[in-house]
Image (tube, helix red, strand yellow):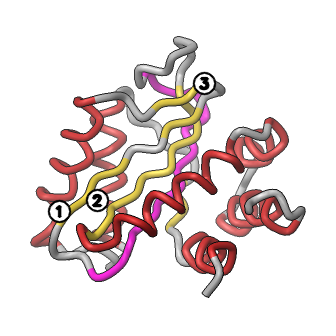
């Protein structure tokens, strides 16, 4: 399977959480882990471990980028596949972005320890997509899951992922 095909498959399988309202980054991360458990893509047994993995990674170095985007992620045992959660926080939260701006677009990844290469490739593709202002604008305007998926995949269809 090509990298683009793998990227498309992972995006299509992603959870989408719109209109987040947490007041800080740690609460947002906990809320996204809770969403993964509620959706059945993360077991209740892995809830605390997933939150700790993402939080520990975030504490070691912020995953926030300029432009209101963050890519929090953590590697852990006990996962069968990569879990991706797109989240939009209309007001944004402080998340240690280099430009000092609040982060409004979050893409959280829970990564099986064995999937290091896939996760690095996925993050690279996401970084290129989210580097485009038009994609970020489309994500912030999204009103449903399909809008979010379409915004990310439109970048792939333009041939700019690989």
Q: Position of residue 52 (x, y in %)?
A: 15, 48
Q: Give the Cα separation between the discs numbered 2 and 1.
A: 7 Å
The label nearer to you, 3 versus 1, is 3
Q: Which residue is label 3 attached to?
A: 66
Q: Position of residue 83 (x, y in %)?
A: 39, 69
Q: Specify start and end residues of the magenta stretch as a single range.
A: 80-94
Q: Which mark is residue 47?
A: 1
Determine the residue positioned at 35% across, 31% down.
Answer: 25
Q: Which residue is label 2 attached to?
A: 34
Assess disc 2: are there few (<14), some (14-19) or many (≥20) residues with their C-alpha within 10 Å of its C-alpha: some
Q: Position of residue 126 (x, y in %)?
A: 61, 53
User: Quadrant of the image for the C terminus?
Assistant: bottom right
Determine the residue positioned at 85% across, 68% down.
Answer: 157
Label 1's element?
A: helix
Label 2's element?
A: helix
* For the residues bearing labels 2 and 1, Cβ distance under 8 angstroms: yes
Identify whether 56 is placed above or below 158: above
Identify whether 50 is placed above or below 127: below
Determine the residue positioned at 66% across, 75% down.
Answer: 8
Sequence-wise first label, 3 or 1? 1
Sequence-wise first label, 2 or 1? 2
User: Is 100 or 15 nearer to us in this picture?
Assistant: 100
Identify whether 30 is placed above or below 76: above
Residue 11 part of the magenta segment: no
Res 75 quadrant in image: bottom left
User: Is 43 or 90 nearer to us in this picture?
Assistant: 43
**Left-right relation of 98 to 141:** left
Q: Which mark is residue 109?
A: none
Label 3's element?
A: loop
The label nearer to you, 2 versus 3, is 3
């Amino acid at each position: 399977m090509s990298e683009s095909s793998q990227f498309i498959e992972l995006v299509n399988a992603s959870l989408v959480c719109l209109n987040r309202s947490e007041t800080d980054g740690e609460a947002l991360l906990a809320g996204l882990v809770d969403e993964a458990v509620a959706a059945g893509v993360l077991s209740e047994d892995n809830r605390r471990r997933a939150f700790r993995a993402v939080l520990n990674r975030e504490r070691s170095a912020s995953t926030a980028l300029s432009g209101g985007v963050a890519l929090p992620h953590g590697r852990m045992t006990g996962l069968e596949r990569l879990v991706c959660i797109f989240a939009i926080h209309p007001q944004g939260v402080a998340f240690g972005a280099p430009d000092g701006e609040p982060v409004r677009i979050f893409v959280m990844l829970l990564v099986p320890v064995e999937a290091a290469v896939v996760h690095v490739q996925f993050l690279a593709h996401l970084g290129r997509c989210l580097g485009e202002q038009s994609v970020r604008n489309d994500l912030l305007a999204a009103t449903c899951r399909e809008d979010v998926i379409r915004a990310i995949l439109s970048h792939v269809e333009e041939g700019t992922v690989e």
